[in-house]
Image (spheres, rainbow, N blue to C red):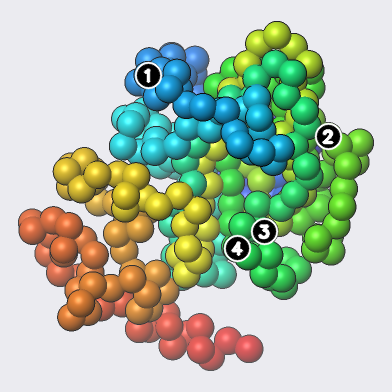
Amino acid sequence: MAIEHLKADDGAERVADVLARDGCAVIDGLVGRDVLERFRAEMQPWLDATRSGPDDFSGRRTRRTGGLVARSATARELITNPTVLGAVKRVLAHGTTFHLHLTQVIAIGPGEAAQPIHRDQWAFDFFPFPKGYEVQCNTLWALTDFSEANGATRVVPGSHRFEDKLQLRPEDTEPAEMEAGSALLYTGALYHGGGANRTDAVRMGINVTYALSWLRQEENQYLSVPREIARELPEDLLRLIGYARGAYALGYVDDLRDPLDVLRSDHAPDGFGDLARARDQLRRP
């Protein structure tokens, strides 16, 4: 099955429909190269300081640089891209809320081998989520062009409906080739893996993922984003980071306070949680 490529103006609903069907989609030209250049300039010191991975899964010739919310204003634009968030909201609509799960630049160096094919939702201690119940939705923004030769992420379209813990090979996959500024979206249940880089150039992508708010974040956003920076961020981004209650009652502070009440003294309290939605969830079969 081929990977479907969508246009930047196709809209979140169309993207979500393809994700429901295939588990993955590429949105071509979602941002311009000027945006990528800004991001590179902001992140270059951190990229240069990052060491290669410690094992075969993370990649011994691959560097993974996180903490993008604190380190890059441009990253915040990508994280809150309306088309992406609109699609994620639809994919994870069965949950009350979702939050930012991971931010990371993945730089696959020359000579890197293909990554084992896996599901990202295995990070949740390999819990066997019901087939069709998505807990995660991911983006991989192409910071450089992605080609089969330089390690384009390899995916198995439709595999979000496969059985769990399958041992798939790179030969079972398709390369998500795309130009810089495009974005691959895929669900947490999709089988995929980084490709082998057979060129002499580094393949770079910006991995931003989202998960249901009742699941622990892979990247600890509260420590990755210093409090003095967090206080200056817009409320919608703060709530996405995790300064919000998950579902009805998860994540409050001491005497049932909203996390934003604690972070920012200028924030007006807005109650405990959405009890009406919680009751509605309880009535569902």
Q: Are marks 2 and 3 in contact (CB under 8 Å)?
A: no
For the residues labelled 2 and 1, the Cα–Cα distance comes to 33 Å
- Residue 106 location, x and y as percent? 57, 30
For the residues labelled 3 and 1, the Cα–Cα distance comes to 31 Å
Q: Which residue is mark 3?
A: 122
Kind of residue at badge 3: Trp
Q: Are marks 2 and 1 in contact (CB under 8 Å)?
A: no
For the residues labelled 3 and 4, the Cα–Cα distance comes to 5 Å
Quadrant where the N terminus is found in the figure: top right
Mark identifier at residue 174: 2
Q: Which residue is mark 4?
A: 124
Q: Residue at x 38, y 83 (%)?
A: 276
Q: Which residue is mark 1?
A: 45
Task: Locate residue 266: give its quadrant.
Answer: bottom left
Quadrant where the C terminus is found in the figure: bottom right
Q: Secondary structure at mark 4?
A: loop
**Counting residues from the N terminus, which is met first, the one under dot 4 or under dot 1?**
1
